[in-house]
Image (spheres, rainbow, N blue to C red):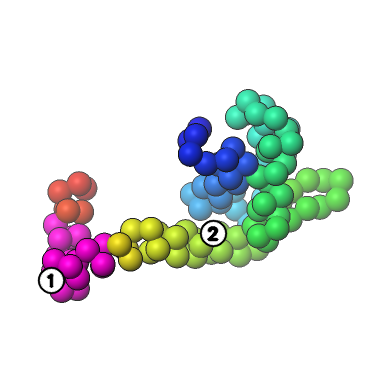
Amino acid sequence: MDESKPLFVQIAEMVEDQIVDGTLREEDKAPSTNEIAAFARINPATAAKGVNMLVDKGILYKRRGIGMFVAPGAREQVLGERKAAFSDTYVAPLIAEARKLGLTADDVTQLITERAARTS
């Protein structure tokens, strides 16, 4: 667990990760709050807060008496949110620094391509 983020946010991200990687697909039953709490060794109320965050975002939906399920379009929604966050967190500062250094878009693309080739 990452101590810089609230546990309920980490729980929501864990479920989102399962949606993104295909472990949980549209209309699949999501883990219950008790299952999540037991797995993560946290209070069920904390797990419920993370799950309810996903319900509020439309990632999961409740079927009364049955449980939580992955909403149609959830994967695309999560990917869109994460791409936007990636852009804000990494791409915008990268562009700002590149401008300070006088680098063009092509220069930055080349640097990224070269770095990716070395780490692959």
**Disc 2 crowd, CA 10 A, few/some/many (<14, 14-19, 20+):** some
Residue occupying image coordinates x 65% and y 45%:
50
Label 1 to label 2, Cα distance in Å?
34 Å
20 is within the stretch colored magenta: no
* In the image, farthest residue toward the front: 100
Residue pointed to by mark 2 = 78
- The secondary element bearing badge 2 is classed as helix
Which of the pair 58/73 is nearer the observer? Answer: 58
Q: Is residue 35 above or below residue 68?
A: above
Q: Quadrant of residue 72?
A: bottom right
Residue 113 spot, x, y in % from top left: 18, 60
Range shown magenta: 94-114
Residue 34 spot, x, y in % from top left: 73, 33
Looking at the rendered image, the disc whose residue lies closer to the viewer, 1 or 2, is: 1
Question: Mark 1 and 2 residues: CB-CB less than 8 Å, in contact?
Answer: no
Residue pointed to by mark 1 = 102
Residue 28 spot, x, y in % from top left: 67, 50
107 is within the stretch colored magenta: yes
- The three-letter code of the residue at mark 2 reads Val
- The three-letter code of the residue at mark 1 reads Gly
Residue occupying image coordinates x 66% and y 34%:
36
**Disc 1 crowd, CA 10 A, few/some/many (<14, 14-19, 20+):** few
User: Of helix, strand and loop, which mostly describes the magenta segment?
Assistant: helix
Checking the image for residue 43, the label placed there is none
Visible residue check, residue 40: yes
- The secondary element bearing badge 1 is classed as loop
Residue occupying image coordinates x 82% and y 46%:
66
Visible residue check, residue 22: no
Which of the pair 107/119 is nearer the observer? Answer: 107
Q: Is residue 2 above or below residue 89?
A: above
Task: Indicate which disc, 1 or 2, sits on the residue closer to the N terminus.
Answer: 2
Left or right of 50, for residue 106: left
